[in-house]
Image (tube, grey):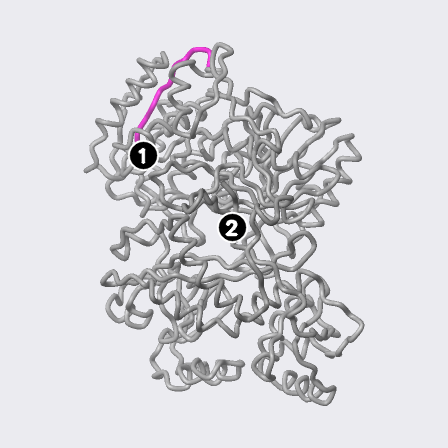
Amino acid sequence: MHLFTEIFPATIENLPKLNAYQLTLIGSLSANEIGGKLKYRLQNKFDGYWYWDSEQECLLANLLISQEQIDQTLKDLWAETDRTFQQNLEGISHTPDLSPSTSGIAKFVAHALLQAVENKIEAKLTTHRQDKGTYYINLICTRFGWVVNGLPAVSLSIRSNIDFKDDLKAFMTKRPNDNIVGLFATDKTKPFNTAMEITKIVGEIGEHNRRTRLLTYDLNPEMRELVANAPDGELVIETNGRYQYVVSALGLRVLNKHYERFGISEKLQISSARRKDYVLPVAKIAQKTGFIGTAYNSNSNADLFLDKTDIGYSTELRFGNGQSASPRSFKDVFPLVLRHGLYNPINDKKIKIAILNTKPQVKLDPLKTNLRKILGDNLGYELTTTETGLINVPKPTPANIERAVNQLGEQQPNIILGIIPQEYGSGDDESDNWTTYDYFKYYTLNKNLQSQVIQPSTIRNDWAVNNIILGILAKTGNIPFVLANSITYADLIVGLDVSRRKKKNNPGSINTAAIAKIYLTNGQFLHYNIRDATVEGETIPRNVLQAIFPVETFQNKRVVIHRDGNLQESEKVDLLAWGKEIGAEFFFVEVIKSGNPRIYAQHGKETRKAPKGSIFKLSDTEALMVSSEYPDSFEATPQPIRVRVHPPFTLTQALHSVLSLTLLHYGSIRPPRLPVTTFYADKISKMASKGIRPAALDGNIPFWI
């Protein structure tokens, strides 16, 4: 077996000379904000390709323009109705002595030079389009720049999208009463268009000089024609809180959470073999430009590939009565719990359950039978129900949900099971709008009641029910299992996430909710801390960080912090200063879950999933790692996570800590790919930023499971 990636080294000797242009700025916008906008203007105005190098804070281009051309461009930008450039950009100057960053070169190849073959790639992938009646399943190629072993590289990845055949205008005509806010749209005038969330209906284009205003923007010819020719009554909508479009310019992309609304049932799984067959022809088109070489692989680049044995990873877990075992896969964990018992059960082994059901037509007998059999007969718990037992809420309005929670809560259950289908929300919703799921969680947490949401579709799925039972056990104070081999290079491991949500009545202010989930070195959950604040800009106040890392818990401790996503430099500086003050050592590990290219395993002529623990080193401080272990029946190719470490903590320690803590999920109905420290981070932070959190800001029950 050998491994290979969908990352390709840039052939530096074939790249054109890149000219750097620096900006002279005034005003409040950052160089990255202005540079990102400016590259599109210059790309449309001049020949050649342009890209913004965010590390060197300069524009890169494969052509040289004169100072006279620059001066005229500035005058044109300053004269625009939109005052962005007039108020923030004072000058552009060619800087021949400034060298592009390696990252800038990589992104220039990916996003600028390979634009030349974008249409050929799109045409190749269109041959795989699947017509499903009311929608298409399309393949899309995404390109990103990377730095591998200090050199520029490009990833070519394939993903499946569902695009509704009706565009947004036709959809609104056929369904005039449907709320489109929260749906996702695509710009029909661009290839490989990215989905944008519809955030507002602005109004008709014929009102308030709206058409004239939109035409002042630097639009591509097709978009300009759509805006110019739209009937006065055509609606203009806003996407991502900032970009405005006429509805006839937008297509509809259907995300998983909207499948039921569109009558869609799909699993967009692409096997490793098929994914390779899609990537290779795309790579050949890109390679013909001469700008990229052969994909990194363990035969030619053995020093860049590691496996789980290289980082000391062990799957051994400790259960009840001091018994240890190594599950072969995620689905084998629950049988080991039944065989050996729980690592640390609650003393009285009594659980009182209440049920709130928003789908009364769903029969709950299979669920009740499983609960009695597994919790009672197999694990020895005394299982009781509240006097009311079950309350049906067929019309789950906020008031009805609150009444039901109040009624059940009066009988002091240990946990309330909420039967809530996915279309009523799941905690993953991006919108500020509250769902039935949100209201159920809000009213239970506000009364310090534990709850477990169960989707009706999982009630007859034994494997899903087993994991739901683990969640019930954890939320009632039990510890099902821990690592058999404790982590030796730390005293505590903390999952840190910070959610930011702009305030509607004050766009400059941001509601911030920060949560720290604290674990012992054997992976046992210790407690959580939540704090929030309203801040200006993106910086988290030092006092908020200090509050979630209190002296009594962290003094004189070695603390590994798993940060969900990118770590803000200000957060790092403040925490290091706080650590020095309280005698704690903080070690930082970033866990980045999206946008990562895949790793494949080649067995002779057969392409398979890369095994869990397969690692591709980008540098001494960063790597891609396959962290999930899917059964053979699951076709999808696992997407690696990206792990970035801040020295003096080592990459090996970071990878080991992350991979080890993927073993400790209680209640996940899918094989997890994230460590328990950052799993559910998005859901927790979104809920917390809405005010959905326990009444107590500190606690020892993992309410998010």
Q: CA distance from mark 2 to mark 1?
A: 38 Å
Residue 519, given in percent of the width and then of the height, sits at 59, 28
Q: Which of these two is toward me, 72 or 83? A: 72
Q: Residues within 10 Å of mark 1 (few under 14, many from 20)?
A: many
Would you say 102 lies left or right of 501 here? right
Can the viewer see residue 490? yes
Q: Amino acid at mark 2?
A: Ser
Q: What's the residue at 42%, 56% (across, down)?
A: 159
Q: Which of these two is toward me, 506 or 288? A: 288
Q: Earlier in the sequence, mark 2 or mark 1?
A: 1
Question: With respect to residue 131, does 378 lie above or below?
Answer: above
Residue 144 location, quadrant: bottom right
Residue at numbered disc 2 = 594
Residue 135, given in percent of the width and then of the height, sits at 28, 62
- Find numbered disc 1 in the image and state the secondary structure of the residue it sits on: helix
Q: Amino acid at mark 1?
A: Ala
Residue at numbered disc 1 = 404
Question: With respect to residue 418, does 624 lie above or below?
Answer: below
Q: What's the residue at 26%, 38% (across, down)?
A: 393
Q: Which of these two is toward me, 237 or 628? A: 628
Question: With respect to residue 343, does 581 lie above or below?
Answer: below
Find out whether residue 351 is within the magenta segment: yes
- Find numbered disc 2 in the image and state the secondary structure of the residue it sits on: loop
Would you say 455 lies left or right of 450 here? left
| Part of the protein shown in magenta | 346-355
Q: Main SS type for the magenta part?
A: strand
